[in-house]
């Protein structure tokens, strides 16, 4: 049984008005013991629970991806369906402790402003949340108020919280959908005027496939390129200044017909806006065909301890805070992005950072190794030292093809997303695959604090460090 959640009300009047509220705790439950799950992941590799893994037959039939891209994935011993490492094959996704069939119901009276306090309390699952038929007005993130943003869907990583306002006007039921990011299952509940009602439950959408951007290869999409015809491609490439020899190494027009597959279709939709920037991006890259891009160039990350625990270093990590989460690029409605978030109150500390540091999120999916900078917690390195009240800009670079919700204890930090003194303050930020995120943090709490990926098994495998905030004057 899930215990009643505790809500801490603000001092004074809550600026967020609502007629009623419900806490919505999303979680993932398995009958398998967590240690058993971890053992499987460790023994068999991160793909153990991925029943959506591409089969050899699928590969030969060329159903999912253009040939060249598939070959490159194989060469790198990675799988584009590895969006989650523990999936709906093991997990039942819950709302307030109730499975999808239980039809947990949140009541409302038509016309009321209903505040839903979403908490992702799962071990390993990123959820995509929507309530078909209702707009979601996001008013709070990680417990702090943000300027209202109206969306149709938002992604919530482990440990994040979002409060949204919905205003259902009709006397009918609405389905609350919490689809796991890899689309292997869903948490489901109902908003209704009375108990016992149900609305249509939408089918799981098509699973997302990781693309080259998710691998830190920059703003290129092989699926889309394969869909382009040779002549058009040659023209754009020439304009962008890329070496023609490089392009010859790519397998063009290998059979993906636009629209038949999600990857190709989505990329094709982006084509009009892509020609020019793609040309520029490619002009600046060493291209010997895609296979020529160095996926393990240690000079891109001098502080990373290279070893078997570091499968890849993103050659072109990008700021992806303006993008919806994985698989939400082409869902046909508005999805919350981090850059939408803006604090209501001016931040308490708006000093420029005193110093900057970069931390790489590193891993090896095959061996299920996860670390920061190639060093796992059990390697017993010194804590990351902060001095009391100093302000540090931390940039997280994701060298893996999974997203990692990175959580710092004892502090809020300001996401660097272009909002200056109104940057959103959070305690957890989900770093997209092949992406990078910066935040500014004021080390205002003396002591030792956990700093880790909030995916349970990533943390357990070592993607964690201690941040030690030392009093000014005592710092060594
Ligand atoms: Cu992680």
Image (cartoon, rainbow, N blue to C red):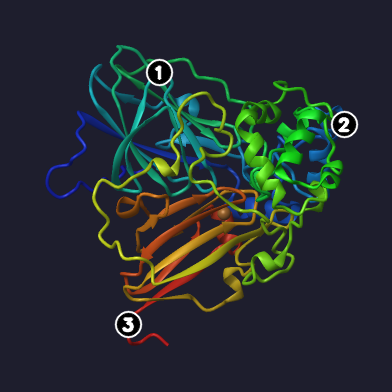
The residue nearer to you, when weighing 209 against 158, is 209
| 3 and 2 marks in contact (CB < 8 Å) | no
- For this orientation, the residue located farthest to the top is 171
> Disc 3 versus disc 2: distance between alpha carbons?
62 Å
Spot occupied by residue 129 in the image (x, y as percentages of width and height): 45, 32
Quarter of the rendered structure image containing ligand 1: bottom right
**Residue on which disc 1 sits:** 133
**Residue on which disc 3 sits:** 472
**In the rendered view, does 205 fall on the left or right side of 229?**
left
Spot occupied by residue 12 in the image (x, y as percentages of width and height): 12, 47
Task: Identify the residue shown where x is 42% and y is 24%.
Answer: 131
Q: Quadrant of residue 255?
A: top right
Task: Identify the residue shown where x is 45% and y is 39%.
Answer: 337
Q: Quadrant of residue 213?
A: top right
Q: Quadrant of residue 199?
A: top left
- Marking on residue 105: none
Spot occupied by residue 371 in the image (x, y as percentages of width and height): 61, 63
Quick check: is the Cβ at mark 2 less than 8 Å away from ligand 1?
Answer: no
**Residue on which disc 2 sits:** 60
> Disc 3 versus disc 1: distance between alpha carbons?
54 Å
Task: Identify the residue shown where x is 76% and y is 34%.
Answer: 235
């Amino acid at each position: 049984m899930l215990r009643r959640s505790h809500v801490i009300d603000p001092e004074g009047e809550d600026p967020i008005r609502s007629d009623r509220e419900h806490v919505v705790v999303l979680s993932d439950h398995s009958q398998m013991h967590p240690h058993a799950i971890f053992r499987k992941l460790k023994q068999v590799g991160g793909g153990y629970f991925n029943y959506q893994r591409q089969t050899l037959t699928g590969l030969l039939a060329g159903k999912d991806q253009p040939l060249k891209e598939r070959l490159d994935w194989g060469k790198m011993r990675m799988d584009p369906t590895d969006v989650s490492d523990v999936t709906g094959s093991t997990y039942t996704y819950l709302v307030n402790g109730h499975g999808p069939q239980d039809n947990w119901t949140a009541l409302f009276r038509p016309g009321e402003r209903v505040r839903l306090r979403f908490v992702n309390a799962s071990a390993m699952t990123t959820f995509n949340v929507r309530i078909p038929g209702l707009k979601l007005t996001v008013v709070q993130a990680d417990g702090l108020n943000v300027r209202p943003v109206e969306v149709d869907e938002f992604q919530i990583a482990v440990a994040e919280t979002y409060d949204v306002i919905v205003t259902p006007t009709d006397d009918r039921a609405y389905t609350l959908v919490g689809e796991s990011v890899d689309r292997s299952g869903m948490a489901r509940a109902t908003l209704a005027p009375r108990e016992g009602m149900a609305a249509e439950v939408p089918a799981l959408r098509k699973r997302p496939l990781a693309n080259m951007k998710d691998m830190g290869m920059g703003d290129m999409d092989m699926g889309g390129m394969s869909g382009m015809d040779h002549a058009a491609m040659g023209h754009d490439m020439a304009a962008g200044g890329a070496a023609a020899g490089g392009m010859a190494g790519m397998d063009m027009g290998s059979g993906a017909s636009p629209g038949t597959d999600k990857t190709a279709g989505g990329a094709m939709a982006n084509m009009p806006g892509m020609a020019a920037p793609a040309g520029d991006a490619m002009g600046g890259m060493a291209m010997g065909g895609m296979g020529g891009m160095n996926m393990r160039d240690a000079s891109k990350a001098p502080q990373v301890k290279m070893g078997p625990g570091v499968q890849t270093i993103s050659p072109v990590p990008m700021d992806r805070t303006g993008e919806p989460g994985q698989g939400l690029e082409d869902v046909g409605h508005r999805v919350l992005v981090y850059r939408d978030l803006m604090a209501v109150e001016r931040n308490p500390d708006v000093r420029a950072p005193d110093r900057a540091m970069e931390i790489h999120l590193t891993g090896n999916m095959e061996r299920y190794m996860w670390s920061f900078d190639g060093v796992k917690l059990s390697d017993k390195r010194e804590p990351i030292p902060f001095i009391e009240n100093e302000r540090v800009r931390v940039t997280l670079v994701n060298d893996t093809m999974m997203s990692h919700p990175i959580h710092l204890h004892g502090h809020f930090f300001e996401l660097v997303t272009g909002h200056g003194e109104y940057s959103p303050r959070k305690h957890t930020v989900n770093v997209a695959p092949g992406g990078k995120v910066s935040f500014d943090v004021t080390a205002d709490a003396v002591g030792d604090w956990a700093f880790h990926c909030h995916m349970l098994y990533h943390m357990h495998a070592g993607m964690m460090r201690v941040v030690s905030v030392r009093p000014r004057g005592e710092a060594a």
